[in-house]
Amino acid sequence: MSPYWMDAHSNSAFLFAFLIISSFPSTFAGLLDPCPNVANLSTSWTNTPGEWLSSPDWVTVKPILLSLGETSGPGFLCGFYCLHESNSCLFAILIFQDVYSPQLVWSANRNRPVRFKATLRLTEDGNLILADADGTFVWSTNTAGKSVSGLNLTETGNLVLLDRNNEMVWQSFDHPTDSLVLQQKLVPGKKLISSVSASNWTHGLFSLSITNYSVAAYIQSNPPQLYYEWRQGWDMISGGIKYTNGSLSMYYDWRFEEDNLTLFAPIPRTLSAQYMRLGSDGHLRVYQWQETEWQEAVDLTDEVLTECQYPLACEKYGICSAGQCTCPGASDNGTIYFRPINERQTNLGCSAITPISCQLSQYHSLLELQNTSYYFQVDMQSTDVEICKQTCLKNCSCKAALFRHSSNHSIGDCSLLSDVFTIQNMEFSTSLFLKVENSPTEKNVGEGGNVVEKKAGNARIILGSSLGALFGVLILIGAFIFLFRKRRYSEEAEEDHLDCIPGMPTRFSFEDLKAITENFSCKLGEGGFGSVFQGTLSNGIKVAVKNLEGLGQVKKSFLAEVETIGSVHHVNLVRLIGFCAEKSHRLLVYECMCNGSLDKWIFHGNRDLALGWQSRRKIILDIAKGLSYLHEDCRKKIFHLDIKPQNILLDEDFNAKVSDFGLSKLIDKDQSQVVTRMRGTPGYLAPEWLTSIITEKVDVYSFGVVVLEILCGRKNLDRSQTEEDMHLLGIFKRKAEENRLADIIDKCSEDMQLHGADVVEMMKVGAWCLQGDFARRPSMSVVVKVLEGSVDVEDNLEYSFSYSSQPPKIAGMGNKAADAATALPIPSVLSGPR
């Protein structure tokens, strides 16, 4: 052990800390005593409930290390910081002046909080590892084998790992979250990322980073939108920015000195605790301790930006004028396209009365807002105003076109926006064209994006539809009469059973759903188990109503879907809002996913609709997070058993959500495998279906197939290709052996081609998930870590994947398994646009 950890200096420092603590109120002194500022190897800590802090969020803290500076200066503590009621905890660093009100300034696991009984270990080989209560890996410093000798929390609040020569191996200052403390630097390649809110620590929408020539603040979009920039203009910031007492200034690595030019605005000097934070509203503020509480010392971005220049001043689509928020007005023909999300709180933004669906692009038009300005500082291209408008209408991801007029009114500069945040109402030579959608039953879009009245429907189509509906009703009536007596008692038992399931969503009557869907008049799509209709709840929320049809598998599918997702909630799972089980009627009510299923976006071969690399990467991560939640975070494990693009739905912002749980199976937590008959879709079935004994790794295999389909822009089985190129897994194996995986990247997307190296790395994730031996496949939680960059893909992957266009035959059963798989109605297009 290095003398650094055992010398007299350490003993005196500990004595000093003890004397300081003894002067604190007794509750906090007991909390911190004994609490050193260093820790040796082979030390571990368990997250047990700590002491309450003075906080409206019911926060507790369990200290591990303590560091005290001068008597009048701030102190820092490192430990577990928990929102007690939600059992959600961070391994964090806190700054404090008064012992009752420490503030969070750094955390290791903000996107993946742990629970009570989680553990932090400083291992014998020098790695600092955080694991959840069930032993699941969460975070580490990745310093194993680097001669680490101990852990230290410095007087400036920097958590460091030092080697035997007291050289720094790792430090928390190199991994900022949303805050900076005094003496901390922000360098190119690192960024501050805001939290969602004070009680939700995950990544929010805003970021602050260093480029070669500027300090820039962005709001997350595709691509990110710039709302603040400080440019030096005459030289590169080759070092970064440094937060010191009195300034946020530039420093230069090549000069080894700081520049006296202060960025933003001067920061008040203080002897008490002070820190800087990028807030969830996009403001960069400095806070300092004033007598008895934390107070805002200065809002740095307010020195440059007006209230209306912040992207979320009036949230999405809100128009800001002198701090007041309104929604875009009516079009020339009087049509209202937007309304406030909350009439009483207009600063919460506006929503489209009819959400934009890319599948209904023929009904899109542009609503022009004159004399407006947009906070987004854009690179614009010179063009004609009509070309600008048409380009936006043809581009699915475009939500608005910003046009800056020149002296020639029709010629100017154009920029396409993928997200529309706050709009400024002011005299300015720009026009903002918002994409809107007209009702397909009433209007259509003509040339130039103008709204024109739609002609009446074809009489033959109406007559044919009516006769078809009548014929269907007659068949349905006959079926009801035939099955009424047999099904009566089982239906009543099923209805009683659903009422006993805890946490069930809203139960609707069939008459309610007829009203919500206007008598099922707007069909969005149909699949093996029924049709999906658009509806609107009384509060204006759009929903998709799935009407299950058929006699054989409907009951099983209905019960599986209600019991599976009725009581689970995750941002990457389609939310079940309600259901109807009334006599023979079986319906499910979901949140509306206006961009439909993933297959519509990756198999079309249309360059105008092709998704870019960041969108596809985000979709893959969303799917992985949804499956990880099903496999590991639910009260019972849930095997989905039918992962494919048709069962991945996209909302208006292209967030992906897993849907269609009609084939899923609930497994007790202590079960590692289950015996079941074959279910799922050919082409996505893992090899172990041959044994009928499966684990959650069958979903991992299906996920691997979907990853390759997303990256390559083609189906895993394409019969239009030659026999050699019919199977995607076969091509993938061949190209991997030739080291030419870039050849199969989706050629419909220039952006995918530009990010070829990143796409090939993502293909390796898919290959890992496709390993023939299910034990070699990663869990979905590990996949999430790989996609987030904290874990590497395993080496020595096997590329000899099994693939077939037919379901596998189970030994000793002839082809019964195949018959079962193909006979099952495939709920793939639950699907269709929603």
Image (spheres, rainbow, N blue to C red):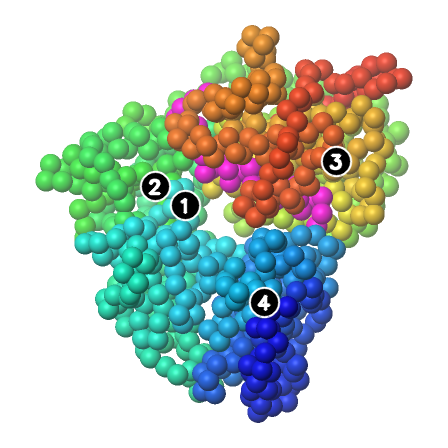
In which quadrant of the rendered view does residue 508 lie?
top right
Helix, strand or loop for disc 4: strand
What's the residue type where badge 2 is placed? Leu
Question: What residue is shown with label 4?
Answer: 151
Asked if disc 2 and disc 1 are in contact, CB closer than 8 Å, the reply is yes
Q: CA distance from mark 2 to mark 4?
A: 47 Å
How many numbered marks have been drawn onto this rendered protein structure? Answer: 4
Question: What residue is shown with label 2?
Answer: 417
Give me the disc on residue 221.
1
Tell me what residue is drawn at x 42 percent, y 76 percent. Answer: 274
Q: Is residue 619 magenta?
A: yes
Residue 700 pos. (x, y %): 68, 35
Residue 285 pos. (x, y %): 38, 68
What's the residue type where badge 4 is placed? Leu
Q: Does residue 754 appear left or right of residue 129 in this picture?
A: left
Q: Which of marks 3 and 4 precedes in the sequence?
A: 4
Classify the position of the C terminus by image quarter. top right
Q: Which of marks 1 and 4 precedes in the sequence?
A: 4
Give me the disc on residue 775.
3
Outermost residue to the bottom:
23
Can residue 342 be seen by looking at this rendering? no
Crowd tier of the residue under label 4, counting other residues whose Cα lies within 10 Å: few below 14, some 14–19, many 20 or above: many
Residue 395 pos. (x, y %): 37, 31
| Above or below, 461 relative to 254 | above
Helix, strand or loop for disc 3: helix
Tell me what residue is drawn at x 61 percent, y 54 percent. Answer: 144
Q: Which residues are magenta?
A: 605-633
Q: Is residue 452 magenta?
A: no
Task: Considering the whole magenta stretch, tell me its main secondary structure.
Answer: helix
Q: Mark 2 against mark 3, which lies toward the viewer?
A: 3
Q: Does residue 624 appear left or right of residue 290 in this picture?
A: right
